[in-house]
Structures are given as structure tokens and as C-alpha cells.
Amino acid sequence: MSLFNVYPLFDITPVTANDVYVYDNKGTEYLDLYGGHAVISIGHSHPTYVKNISKQVSKLGFYSNAIQNPLQVELASLLENISGCNDYQLFLCNSGAEANENALKLASFHTSKQKVIAFKNSFHGRTSAAVAATDNPKIVAPINAQQEVIFLEFEDLASVEKVLQGNDVCAIIIETIQGIGGLDEASTTFYQGLEKLCNQYNTLLIADEIQCGFGRTGDFFAFQKHGITPHIISMAKGMGNGFPVGGILIHPSIEASYGLLGTTFGGNHLACAASLAVIETLKKEQLMENAQQIATYFMEQAASIPQITIVKGRGLMLGLEFDFPIAELRKNLIFKHHIFTGSAKNPNLLRILPPLTIQKQHIDMLFESLKKELS
């Protein structure tokens, strides 16, 4: 049986990893500045993470949500404490796309409306409603296109209000900082304007924090910089440091009822053990503070390369925009310098999404390699 060929693959086969380094089957060491799409938050094979999962799987790996799971209760408590999202409710699932599916479904249930406002260059997942709210027609199948989604520009509050006046929009979904779309972030005025309009027109504001949440920007959630209170917050990626886990935080104004949402694997014992390890490590090793400090250093080093037209993003969710397409540069970084980086919808943007444990010497390695390639 062959694999369904949907991924263009680099000819690299990782077999082990430790902190910010990945090692392939030939023994080559790679500096990981991409974290597997921003998933690796506390570093590869972190000892607390390995200990938590190993201990839990030796006792109980899985049982369904038909029984009590104290690990879910503990995770909810620690999430409230570290995020400051007091009195929100937690629903656990398995991925970012699933988190957004549940967020959109819950918004529709709550408001009895069906339309969604999303934004140009957005990416919210590849499943039913999530992919319909993603600004990429190539990955939207006809069955997904049945969803009613209106795409608008960042900063265009007038158009948002015009659509909301139809009184048929259940949710506005927005990435605080766009990921695949190219690391654009709107102004505080815009985010606060969205919140005000949502409250005015009985529409839920969904903050998609799947890539930028869990400490990556230096704040626990990226929206917190803008002083807003979303109705629903979706999260995944760095939440489990590689173990599949996602979830939504739900504002207390939204009521639960039996059967409203559900999942077989979501919030399983191993997923909770993984996420508990992430939160413990974020706090103990002060990784959000590290993200801020390394970002400052990163900006300083980027200023020494004239081909970089702009540095985008915050914390350790960063993009280097050049005055040329970066595809060849990215390949050279991988195969000549053994550094993993990422691409974006913007062909000139090199994405940097390392583990939050990264140090200044690793940033130096990147910029030394860039200077060699660009000289």
C-alpha cells in the first residue's frame, strides 16, 4: 500500500530530537527554527514532558468522556491561572481544526445564526467549516463551500458592520496574528472595534490562537495585547508540544447542555498529561519571558541584513520578509546549513517558529548562515 501523496517532502528522515535540535537517520544535526508548524513549545523530548506522558501511559492511557477525568479539571485550573482568562469554560478536542469547528458550531447554536465573517489571508483549518473560513479556494471542496463565509480586509470595520446589519452572522473568527497568511496583525483599534460590533449585533468573537497562543508571542494569548475579551478562544499546536491536543475556552455567558459538543479522544489522559507538562514548564522555565527577550535580540540581528525589508510578528512567531522569493534560500538553509525554517502564503516571507527554549546562540547561527547565503 502506498501513502496518499499529498505532502511535498524534503528528503530528511528525523529519528531523534532534543530541545532545539533534530537528528536524522544519517546522524546529521539540524537546528529546528520551525518547531513542526509552531507545535514544539517547550523543546523536543523535554524531560518533564517525557516523564508526564510515560508515567500516565503506564497507568491509564485512555478512557472515554463518559467517566470522571481529574486531569481535565486540573488542566482547566492551571489554564485559568496562567492565561488570566477567569471564569471561562474548557472544552477539549484533538486539533486546531477541530477546535475551530467546535467554536463555529457553538457560535451558531448560541446565536441561532449561520453566516461567518473571516478575513483575507486567513487559515483556520482543513475541515468542514474551518476550511470554508480559510482564504484558500484550492483547499475548499464543493461540500465545504456550502458554508456561508464572508471574507473582509483587516482594519475595515465599516464593511464588518455593514455585513452584521443583516443580523445573520453567528461569528467573526480572526487570527490575532496570521500564520500561514504571512504574520500580519491588525491594530488594537480594529480588534476592539470588532468586539464592540459583536456585542452590538449578537455575534460571537472567536480568537483563533492555535498558532500564536500558549506563550509563543510572549503573552499567553496574542489577543491579550489588545485588551479584548473574546467569546471563544481556540487553541492547539504548542498546547501539547507534539501530542495531539486542542481545545476552546468558552465565555461564561455561553451555557452548556448535554450533547451540545462531544469527542471520543478529546481530553484523554495522555493529552492532559502532555498539556500539563507544557504549562508547568512554561512557568518554571519562564519561557514567555524568554520569548520576549529572544525576540528583541532577533530584531537587533535582523537589522544587520539589508535584504530583509521588514521583520513581522511578535515574540517567537516571527517572519523575515525579503525583496525576493525565499524558496531557494529556505532549501539552502536546510541542506547546506542544517536549519529548519518555514514558508508562508507570501512567497518572500521566511517564517521562524522555534521552541520557546531557544537561546541567543541559536539566533546567531541563523543570521550567520543568512549572511553567507546572501553575500
Image (cartoon, grey):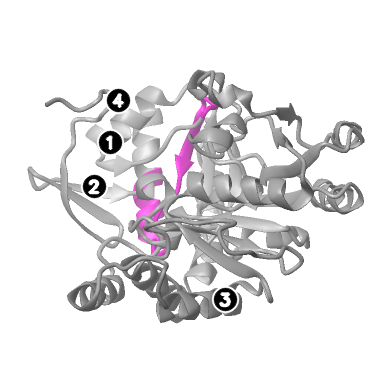
Q: Which residues are magenta?
A: 345-367
Dot 2: within a 10 Å radius of its alpha carbon, few (fewer than 14), some, or many (20 or more) residues?
many
Q: Is residue 105 left or right of residue 326?
A: right
* Distance of label 3 from label 1 (alpha carbons): 35 Å
Residue under circle 3?
Answer: 82
Q: Are marks 2 and 1 in contact (CB under 8 Å)?
A: yes
Q: Quadrant of residue 50 in the image? A: bottom left
Image point (25%, 64%), residue name: 45
* Distance of label 3 from label 2 (alpha carbons): 32 Å
Element marked by disc 2: strand
Element marked by disc 4: loop
- Percent coordinates x, y for residue 291 in the rendering: 51, 63
Q: Quadrant of residue 83 in the image? A: bottom right
| Magenta stretch: includes residue 58 | no
Q: Nearer the viewer, mark 2 or mark 4?
A: 4
* Distance of label 1 from label 4 (alpha carbons): 15 Å
Residue under circle 2?
Answer: 30
